[in-house]
Image (cartoon, rainbow, N blue to C red):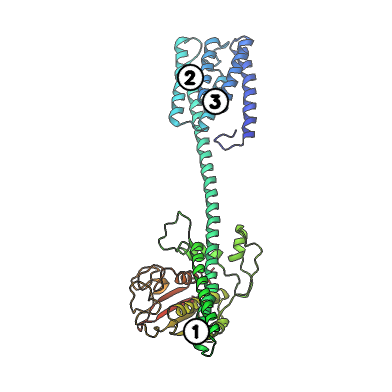
Amino acid sequence: MSVETGWPAGRWAWVAGFGTAALLVLTTSDMGQHYDVPLGAALALGMARAVALDLTWLRPPISVPVSLLVMALTAAISTPVSPSEPWPWPVTGIFGHCAVLVVIAARGASRRAMAGWWALTQLVGVIAMVLAPDRGSWPGLLTMAVFSAVAVVLGDLLRSRAETRRQLAEQQTISAAERAERARWQERARIARELHDVVAHHLSVLVVRADSAPHRLPDLPAETRDEFSALATEARTSLTEMRRVLRLLREAPTSSNSPDGEHLSAGAAAEVQETEAVLVGPRGEARSGGGVLAAEREGLPGVAGARLEPQPGLAELPQLVERAREAGADIRLDAQQAGLADQAVELTAYRIVQEAITNALRHAPDAAITVAVRQTQDSLIVSVVNGPSPGNDGPSQGSTATGGDARPPADDRGHGPTGDRGHGPTGDRGHGLTDDRGHGLIGMRERAALVDGRLRYGSTPVGGFAVEVTLPREASW
C-alpha cells in the first residue's frame, strides 16, 4: 500500500515495522523503569502504542482515538518514580502520539480535523492534571502542546509536498500525451498537404488533359473519345474521394472548437515547424528537426524507416509549367535568374505554385496564367496570376464563393482587405475565393508560415485571381 506522501509501499512497510518494534520495546522499558508499571501492564501499553501506530496505515480514522485512549490509560496507571519524569505524558507516549499525528496529517486528513485532534490531545492532558495534580506539572502539558503542534504542521507539509509532486506528475503525463497527440495531428496535416499538393495536383491535370483531348486531337475515333471521357470521370471521382480523405485527415479531436477546419493552422509557425515535412537542409542534408525524423522520435506508426527523397525546388518550375501547358493551359513562366534560396524555402515556393496552378486549372480552365519569380537580396517573391475565364464576368476562382469583388490580393500575413486575419477578400475564413470544400489556401498559408513567409491572395480588378507569397531566402528554424 502506498500512502499520499509518495513513498513506495515497500519503504512504508519498513518504516512501519521499525516504528512498531521501537515503540513496543521503548514503551515497555520506560513504563517499567520510570513509572512503576508492572511488566505485564508495561508490555500491554507498549503493544497498544504500537497498534495505534499501525492503525494509521490500516484504519486511519480510528488511529488517533486509539492513541488518545492509550495515553489516558498510561496516565491512569502510571506514577513517576522521580519528580523529573514527565507526566501525564511519558517521553515514549509523546513521540508515539506525535508519530500518529504526523502520519494521519500526511495521509490527507483535513486541517480542521487535525486541529480538532490536537485540541482533544490537550484536553486529555488537562483532565489528567486536574484529577491528579500531584503527579505532574503544567510545563509538561506545554511540552506536549508544542510537540503535537509541530507534528501536525510537519504532516501537513508532507501532504502538501506529496500533492504537489502528484500534480506535477499528472501535468507531465498530460503534457507528454498532448505532445504525442499534437505530433500525430501535425503528421496528419503534413500527409494531407502532401496528398493535396502532389496527388490531387496530378489528378487535376489528368482531368484537364482528358477533357481537352478531343479538342486538341480532333481526329480521334468515337471509342477513343468515350475512353477519354470515362477517364476524366474516373479522375473526378478520385478527386472527390481524395477531398474526403483530406477532410478526415484535417479533422481535429472533438475537443477542438475551430469553426473552419483549420485545426492545425493556428500557431503553425510555432508548433508545426518541428514536425513539418521539410526533409532536407540548405545543402541537402537531412534535417533532424522535422518531418519523418521528428515523427520517428515520437514513435508514429508507419513512419519509422521512411526514406528521404529529393524535394522539388525552383529548378523544377519549368517542368511544372510545361506539364500544365501540355494539359492545355495557357501558361507563362517569368522566372528571374538569381542565386538559389534555402531548399526548404524552394520547396515551399514550388508547392504554392503547384497548388495555385491547380486552382486556376480547376476554376478557370481557359484563363491565361502567369507564374512570376523574383528575388531580392533577402526575399523570394513568387506570384501566380490567372485572368478571368472567357465568358465569365465574375472572379475566376470565386465563381462558387459567396460574394466577391475585384479587390487586390489580401494584405501581408494572410490579412484580407477587411483586416480579418486569414480571411480572403470575401471574408470566407481560410478559403478566400475558393469553394468552401477546398483546402488549397489553407495549405498555402500553412506552408508560408512554416518558413516565416507572407501569403497574399485575392481577386484582381479584371476578374481574375492572384496569389503572391514572399519568402525569406533562408528558412527560420
Q: Secondary structure at mark 2?
A: helix
Judge the density around disc 1: few (<14), some (14-19), many (≥20) Cα neighbours within 10 Å: some
Which residue is disc 3 drawn over? 59
**Numbered disc 1: secondary structure:** helix
Q: Sequence order check: which comes first, mark 1 or mark 2?
A: 2
Residue 111: image location, x then y, percent: 45, 31
Q: CA distance from mark 1 to mark 3?
A: 85 Å
> Mark 1 = which residue?
212
Q: Amino acid under label 1?
A: Ser
Of tags 1 and 2, the one toward the viewer is 1
Disc on the earlier residue, 3 or 2: 3
Residue on which disc 2 sits:
141
Query: In the image as oriented, which residue stretches furthest toward the bottom?
Result: 219
Q: Residue 473, can we see it?
A: no
Does the residue at mark 3 contact the one at mark 2 (Cβ under 8 Å)?
no
Q: Residue furthest front?
A: 222
The disc label shown at residue 445, or none: none
Measure how far apart labels 1 and 2 are at the Cα level. Answer: 103 Å
- Of 385 and 16, which appears nearest the observer? 385
SS state under label 3 = loop
Name the residue located 45 percent from the left edge and 21 percent from the top edge: 120
Q: Residue 273: x percent and y percent?
A: 53, 65
| Residue 100 higher or lower than 346, as above or below | above
Residue 89: % across, % down: 53, 17
Residue 420 found in image quarter? bottom left
